Amino acid sequence: MGEPNGLKSPIDANELEKLKLFWRMRTFKSGVTITLPPTFAAISILLYVFLDDASPSVLFGWAFFQCALLAAFIWLVRGVGTEEFDLARARRDWWRISLLQLVSSLAWMAMFPYLALVVRNTELAVLTAVATAIFFAVALVTRAAPRLAVFHIVGMSVSLLSATYLIAGFEGWPTALLTVIFASSLLLLTFEEERAFARSIAGEMKREEAESTVRLLLNDYEEQSSDWLWTVDAEGKLRDVSARFAAATGSEVDVLESSVFIDLFMPSEERDSLARHVADRSRFRDLVVKLRVDGETRCWKLSARPRYDGWMSGVARDVTSDQLVEERVAFMAHYDNLTGLANRYLFNDRLRNALSTGDRARNVVLFYLDLDDFKAINDTRGHLVGDRLLREVGTRLEQEVRGQDLVARLGGDEFAVLLEARGGAGMLIERAHRFLAVIREPFEIDGHFYRISGSIGIAKCTDGNCEAQELMRCADLALFAAKEKGRDTLALYDQALDRAARERRDIEADLREVIARGQLGLHYQPVINLDTGKIAGYEALLRWYHPQRGIMTPSEFLYVAEETGMIVPIGEWVIRQALAETAEWDGSFRIAINLSPTQMRSPHLAEVVAQAIHAHGTDPERVEFEITEHVLLQENGVCTGNLEKLRELGTKIALDDFGIGYSSLSYLRRFPFDRIKIDRAFVDGIDSSADNQAIVASITRLAEALGMATTAEGIETRAQLDLLRKLGCEEAQGYLICEPVPGEHFETPDAVTAAMRGEDSCLLDYRKSREAVLKRRAKRAS
């Protein structure tokens, strides 16, 4: 029901009376409307049946009077239920209605005894039916007015009892008894109806008060909060538009009133969902839609629920700022913040989806691209320049692919390109060369030109049944292979790369247990004095006695140990084992031990060396540690500190592989080495290469000037041995002298002599010739 007369809370006495009158008159109107046709029918039937037996003037007068009363009823209740409901008028109309009903009931009460006097047996049934109908019909009409109902029931009971007595006398007692029972039941029903009416009025009062309270709270909420209330009718048109809601849309109240609510919002899936909810009048929450307000796109979050009257009411909130934050978070979750390219998460997702599409998976190709020595750019030019270069690289790569392809930045200077291609290896290599070409082109940043290059690994799903992780692993292996070739190159994955990777993993797994299993051993290679031919020292060389692979040299496994950090415990074992074994040998010699770059970064290196020297009573001056230029390239304070600590212990330091590094001369100036070891690259072919001879001669003179000794590596012929001595080299080692063998071959002088008698060794002959020369020199001197 709508509000009668615009009732407002709180409900005072007048409002309560108005509410009661409204309900009573509406109920009375409903009863009159229902009983009007039966009442006219009853009047007409009585006229027809009793016209010959009763006085026509009485019957017609009575019928006319009843019809007039019915017309008056209709006139008085015509305005009940409309918005115009005046209390004073309602009081007058109700009093008139009550009076008319009273008179109508009296007229019926008088008619039945009168007709009982003239009724014939054939007419008795009609009279009884009409009397019963009027008895109950009027009781139905007057149920909202209990006093009138009681008067009608009691009066009609007396009338019917009188009519019964006039017709049947005391023999009509069963009919009389039935009348009394019906009357009693109607009276009880009337009283119960009145109590129900009272409860209904009380409930309506509470509802009105609650509605008023809610309305006040909603008005206060809308005024104080940042949300706006909205209402649409059954057709989806806005109703009761508030000024705040209109202001939020950038429009006027009059314009929005009765306009289609959905038309406010921009086309989208969310707008379509909103239209379905409004059409179905179904509840929804937190539906975000977009609209244009004063030329700017805004985001609203809508919630609504249907009302009992077929309308919908809801609340709207501007969540533009929150939506921008959410969109930014979503962007950051899927895209790289620096370049705007897809990040690793989105790349992995797209790759998995591409590989799950059946036959199309056969065409999926993955390019891994890594910039060469990009760290140097960051270190020399700063990260701002490096970041701009990365953005430019990403832009150039995107320009080389189609719209459906994906370019991603996986992190650092590593990029990935995901595309579909049906061509073979040649087409893939051509595409990779295009990527390398665009990276190779100079970049202009702030007026400066920068040139960089990259390496690319390529992997393709060939059998159509690839896993994303497996394809990425293959591309990574190909990239690693490309980098091993050098800069600005590419590699296509094949099974050989996979076998190499598996072999490396197996070596790494076995290497972790190598010390605990006692599989390591040391071989020693003698170093001779070129002037005397006598042994000046030994170089300790690591060997791995692998149960399946046999004896493995450092070149086969040391790179794995270096990369994984296992070189540190292995290197410490070598130091302890070399000093422990050589401590028992006869003779005065030095022992050379190699140190890796990773070992040189260990803060415990000097402590381990000191403990080993002390444990075996070795003279520190007999211990020589060999390092390569890679150690000095690290420019690490720990490395420099370890070198100084080793020198303080009294040990010697040798620079290994001299001459093949980046700036060997600068290293000689930075640290006072005791020995320079000339790399085998200059020894090989020295007897036929004037360039190599000149280089070796220069090295020996430089070392002599700096007070450093020299040792040549890789001696394989007697001619090399003699030439190196003439060029000023002091010591030499190589397979010509003796190949590396276990330590028991050098424990005693006899064992050393036996070792020197090897099939390829010419040491004893060389020593004899040198002894002869020295004797002749001594004679001439004397």
Image: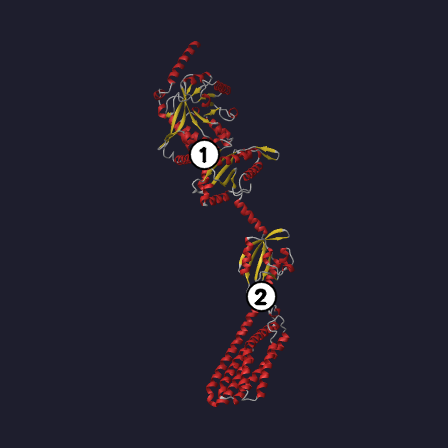
Image quarter where the C terminus lies is: top left
* 340 up-or-down from 268: above or below: above
Position of residue 764 in the picture relative to residue 641 (left or right): left
Q: How far apart are marks 1 and 2 (CA)?
A: 77 Å
Label 1 environment density (alpha carbons within 10 Å; few <14, some 14–19, many ≥20): few
Determine the residue positioned at 54% across, 56% down.
Answer: 273
Q: What residue type is labelled 2?
A: Glu
What colour scheme was applied to this rendering of the protein? Answer: secondary structure
* 151 up-or-down from 678: above or below: below
The answer to whether residue 530 shows anywhere in this view is no
Q: What residue type is labelled 1?
A: Glu
Task: Tell me residue 450's x, y (percent).
Answer: 57, 33
| Residue 215 vs residue 50, the one in the foreground | 50
- Say what secondary structure mark 2 lies in: helix
| Residue 664 vs residue 44, the one in the foreground | 44
Residue with the mark numbered 1: 563
Residue with the mark numbered 2: 211
- Circle nearer the N terminus (1, 2): 2
* 217 up-or-down from 606: above or below: below
The answer to whether residue 156 shows anywhere in this view is yes
- Say what secondary structure mark 1 lies in: helix
